[in-house]
Amino acid sequence: MLKSILTVGGWTMASRVLGFGRDMLIAAKVGAGPMADAFFVALKLPNLFRRLFGEGAFNAAFVPAFSGMLAVEGRAAAQQLAERMAVLMSLWLSALTVLGMIFMPYLMAVLAPGFSTDPAKFQLAVELTRITFPYLLLICLTALVSGVLNGLEKFAAAAAAPVFFNLLSMASLLALAPFVATPAHALAWGVTASGVVQLGIVLWACARAGMALNLFRLPRLTPEVRLVLKRMLPGLVGAGVTQLNLAIDVIIASLLPTGAVSYLYYADRIGQLPLGVIGAAVGTAVLPLLSRQVRAGQPLSAHRTANRAIELALLFCLPAALGQALAAGPIIEVLFMRGAFGAAEAAATAAALSAYALGLPAYVLVKVMLPGFFARGDTATPVKIGFAAVGLNLALNLVLMQALAHVGVALSTALAAWFNALALGVVLYRRGHWLPDRQLRRRLPRLLAATAVMAGVLWLLGMVLFPASGLWRYGALALLVGTGLAVYFAAAWGFGALSLAELRQTLRRRRKP
């Protein structure tokens, strides 16, 4: 499991680093004004589907079915299931894409109702979303093929494909901007082009793995296909609650003054780094393993897998969350404050990042808890909890936005995420599907103690290093982050929350054939 997590997490880290480069370029060229707001709304809808399918409901329903069929009935039967699902997905997503492009003005009135007060921004958002909307079809097919690769325990290509989203976005902004109406149009065309490239990469990798998929097979609603659909449809809400909450954030933010959508986007991009590297990596790697253990009737192994996944997730996300909250200002200034993105925009974005960071451990725990339901074929329970979390987020948004503006929107999302994570954990515990073992109970308070030590060092060092200006701020931020990480892992080792010998043994086991 650790090797798979490192593979997915490593490629995700590469993608996120390039994503920071892309966002830094967007901030410098586009800033945080009406054009940026319009583009980020245009990006939100296909990205919502990408996260729901690529990291949520589809994999939750498809990977256990595919892995089980592969183990019991062989590669031919598993390949038929994948091809039939691909054809069905292509048909209904093509229809959805066409309808979405036709009725985009009405869809935009729902997604960003506040834009209607600015006709130019509203029309720009409609144009940009029509350009990006085909990405929905392409990236959902990419998610399906990635699910096949994950079921085959081939994680690298699927994790590497998003790198090209960032590369093509940057290339389009630099190369196409002089030839289209606005830089935002260039970015939108780059999004759609990246969907074509990502789909091509995972299809090629699948063929190399010995399972070349025929995407033109006649569709058939076999019992296996029906089962996947039955589990997938309700899971769209349960698996994607965080993303649905972020979509609500955009709707609410569109009602706030210009720039609110952009502030939340830039802050969310920073916050999503640990979520993608840690949460998505752990969730992706755990689901196939947990599915096999549940299917094989190995409850003790399943409990051990769940506990080690939670332990690994908290080991990395606790310092990331606290670091983001305490160093939000320097992080935003160093990454984005240049060109069209000034000090006022940096301060507003940093405030949103601090609020989002409070929910980071919860976002990651949701990713880790969900496989405990999906491996057992239960997508209904996460849906029920998800609806409650979405309702709570909406209610908190309406209350907190009055006094805290866009920061209230981010804080609402964080609080709703904690409700979601705690509710999922309580249900798994009461059903006996997750029992915290001695090692987790012993190490969790020690991880919290190590995090507290790091917090104190960051606070004191931050007072010395900042405010900084010019090139010195880059070195000051690097020193702050590096010192914080060193102190945290040293404290975790000293308190007994981190065992280097155990980590070496795990890596040695993974190297053995």
Image (cartoon, grey):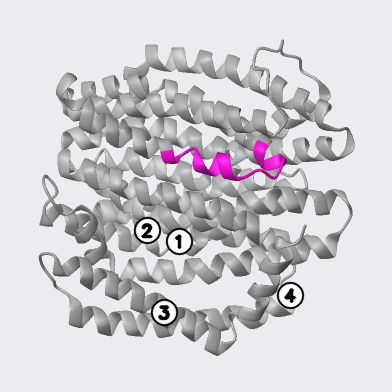
The three-letter amino acid code for the residue at tag 3 is Ala
> Mark 3: few, some, or many residues within 10 Å (few <14, many ≥20)?
few
- Which tag, 1 or 3, sits closer to the chain's start? 1
* Mark 2 vs mark 4, CA separation in Å: 30 Å
Q: Tag 4 or tag 2, which sits nearer the N-term?
A: 2
> Are discs 4 and 1 less than 8 Å apart at CB?
no
Which residue is found at the position 51% from the left and 80% from the top? 448
Percent across and percent down for residue 346 are: 18, 56
Check disc 4 and report the residue beneath it: 437
Q: Residues within 10 Å of mark 2 (few under 14, many from 20)?
A: many
Q: Given contact means CB atoms under 8 Å apart, are the residues at marks 1 and 2 in contact?
A: yes
- Residue carrying label 1: 360
457 displayed left or right of 146: left
Cβ–Cβ under 8 Å for marks 2 and 4: no
Residue stretch rendered in magenta on the structure: 149-163
- The answer for how far apart the CA atoms under marks 1 and 2 are is 7 Å
The nearer-to-camera label among 1 and 3 is 3
For disc 2, the marked residue is: 356
Front position among marks 3 and 4: 3
Q: CA distance from mark 1 to mark 3?
A: 21 Å
> Mark 4: which amino acid?
Asp
Q: Secondary structure at mark 2?
A: helix
